[in-house]
Image (cartoon, rainbow, N blue to C red):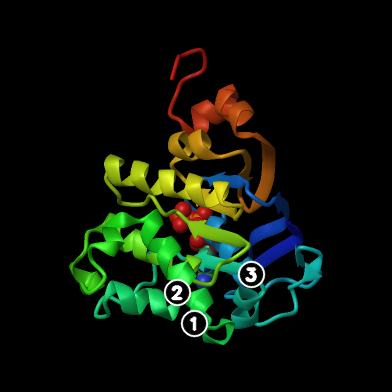
Amino acid sequence: MLEIAGLSVRYGKHLALDDVALKVGRGEIVVMLGANGAGKSSLLKAVGGMVKREPGASIRLAGTELAGLPAHRIVGAGLALVPEGRGVFGELTVRENLALGAFPHRGRAAEADNFERVQNLFPRLRERLDQAVRTMSGGEQQMVAVGRALMSAPAILLLDEPSLGLSPLMCKELFQALARIRDDGTGVLLVEQNARQSLAIGDRGYLLEGGRVVGSGSAAALGADPAVRAAYLGVAHGEAA
Ligand SMILES: Nc1ncnc2c1ncn2[C@@H]1O[C@H](COP(=O)(O)OP(=O)(O)OP(=O)(O)O)[C@@H](O)[C@H]1O
C-alpha cells in the first residue's frame, strides 16, 4: 500500500539517506532496524515531509504520489507519524491531545468512533482522559502519542523508536497494541533499535546502515540471521538467543 523509492536526504555534505526503497502492505508491521545514526529518524521525517528530500523520490500510498505534498497534506492523505520523543502536549489532558489528532472535517461521528477505538486499544487512557499528560509515565505518554496519530484513522502508522526509555512491561504492552492495530488493517512502519521485540511482532523487516538499506526479509528470517543476531540482538555467532 505504501511504496517508497529513491528516497535520499542530505544534510550539507552528509548523505544521511541514500536511495532508500521499501514497501509496507495493508495490515503488515514492517520493522526498520538500524544502529544510532543509521538514518532511521531521517527516513520517517522525509516520508512525513519534515525534512527536505533530494529530488527523484517517490512516496506512493495506494497508488497516489505524495512526494510533492506539504507535511499537513501527507497526514491528510493517510500517513500518521509518531515522532521520536512523542511530540505530545504535556500541559494538555489526554482528551485534548487526542482531539488534536482528529480531522474535524471528517465529522463528529468519525471522531467519536476513532476516540472509542483508541480507548479500547489503550484502556489506561480511558481511565485518565482528564489527566495532564506531563503527569503520566513515559509509557502512558507514548500511548497518548500513538492514540493521537490513530485519531486520523491512518492507512499507515509510522513510529520512531516508540520503545525508547520504556520499561520492559510497558514496551510489551505497547507492542501488543501495535499488533492489534495491524490486525485491524493498518500498515505499520516501526523504526526501532529494540530488535528482539520488534521482530517478534513484525511481519517483515529491513536493515538500514549508513543511510542505505543493506538487507531485508521476513521478520523470522532476519531474527534467525547470524549477522543480524550479532549486530542487533547482541548474540555472538553460534550462540543461542
Ligand atoms: N538536522 C541535521 N543536520 C545535520 N545532520 C543531521 C541532522 N539530522 C540528522 N543528521 C545526521 O544524519 C545521520 C542520520 O541521523 P538520524 O537521526 O536519521 O539517525 P537515526 O538512525 O535515527 O539515529 P538515532 O537512533 O541515534 O536516533 C546522523 O549522522 C546525524 O548526525
Q: Quadrant of residue 241?
A: top left
At x 33% / y 79%, what residue is drawn? 96
Residue 108, label in figure: 1
Describe the element under mark 1 as helix, strand or loop.
helix
Q: Quadrant of residue 53?
A: bottom right
Visible residue check, residue 13: no
The percent position of residue 139, horizontal first and vertical second, equals 29, 55
Visible residue check, residue 230: yes
Describe the element under mark 2 as helix, strand or loop.
helix
The crowd level at tag 1 (other Cα within 10 Å; few <14, some 14-19, many 20+) is few
Task: Give the residue pinned by disc 3.
Answer: 78
Nearer to us: label 3 or label 1: 1
At x 66% / y 66%, what residue is drawn? 9
Q: Nearer the viewer, residue 15 or 174?
A: 174
Q: Amino acid at mark 1?
A: Arg
Q: Amino acid at mark 2?
A: Ala
Q: Mark 2 CB in 8 Å range of ligand 1?
A: no
At x 36% / y 61%, what residue is drawn? 119
- Residue 132 against residue 121 in the figure, above or below: below
Q: Amino acid at mark 3?
A: Gly
